[in-house]
Amino acid sequence: MSVMDWLDKEESRGEEQKTSGARQLHYRPWPGKGPQHHESPPLSLNEAVAAGFPGFVPDSAIPEQPVLPDLAELEERVIGALRTVFDPEIPVNIYDLGLIYGLTIDQQRNHVDIQMTLTAPGCPVAQTFPGEVEQRMVEVQGIDSAKVELVWDPPWTRERMSEAALLTLGML
């Protein structure tokens, strides 16, 4: 079928027929083309796709774009996961303790970068704690990878703690 033939035809809505298991598409002439218009044999879906007619690509052949969660929703999930990680020496989670200095979420890569500190530079979990936090992050729906960087500037102080943490520790 030539492009000119294609332009003279219109896909008829709801007139698909199954013929010996193959899907056939039937066309009707555009209005006003007159009696000289001849009817072409039906074009199969595979023939239409092979010919490059864009209107005939079945929906199932078009890959779905993943629906990205809302950034605020994803950030809530990440913070929720951070609140499940507790400092081994203080019975408060690392988020409310104020150990999280930076949180960057890359939705396109499903990745989160975290900058965090510890209560003291000589903390015995300094070698293992970032890995534990990374593991907790990849358990979050919508996050596939994480990188945790320990930072020491500015030094952590109790002023970084949330009111909930201060209440838990009886400091408020």
Image (spheres, rainbow, N blue to C red):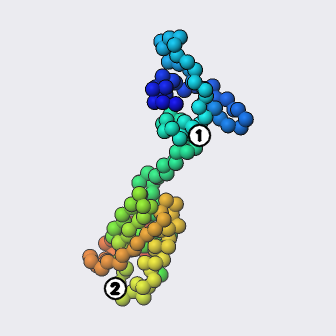
User: Is residue 97 at all visible to an observer of this figure?
Assistant: no
Could you tell me the amino acid type at mark 1? Asn
Res 15 quadrant in image: top right
Name the foreground residue: 98 vs 106. 106
Left or right of 126 on screen, residue 45: right
> Residue visible at 45% across and 54% down?
73
Question: Which residue appears farthest toward the left when viewing the image?
Answer: 154
Q: How many dots with numbers? A: 2
Which residue is the site of mark 1?
46
Query: Which residue is nearer to you in this view: 170 or 6?
Result: 6
- Secondary structure, mark 1, is helix
Q: Quadrant of the C terminus?
A: bottom left
Location of residue 18 in the rendering, given as x and y in whole percent from the top left corner? 69, 32
Q: Which-is-in-front pick, marks 2 and 1?
A: 1
Q: What residue sits 50% from the left and 71% below the top?
A: 136
Left or right: where 9 falls relative to 165 = right
Toward the viewer: 21 or 71?
Answer: 21
**29 on left or right of 113:** right
Quick one: label 1, few (<14), some, or many (20+) residues within 10 Å?
some
> What is the secondary structure assignment of the residue under circle 2?
loop
Residue at position x 54%, y 26% in the image: 11
Q: Residues under labels 2 and 1: Cα distance?
A: 66 Å
Residue 93 point in image, percent of width and height: 45, 72
Name which quarter of the figure residue 111 lies in. bottom left
**Tag 2 near tag 1, CB within 8 Å:** no
Residue type at numbered disc 2: Pro
Q: Which residue is mark 2?
A: 121
User: Of callouts 2 and 1, which one flags the residue occurring earlier in the amino acid sequence?
Assistant: 1
Image x and y of residue 154, in percent: 26, 76
Is residue 136 placed above or below 53 in the rendered structure?
A: below
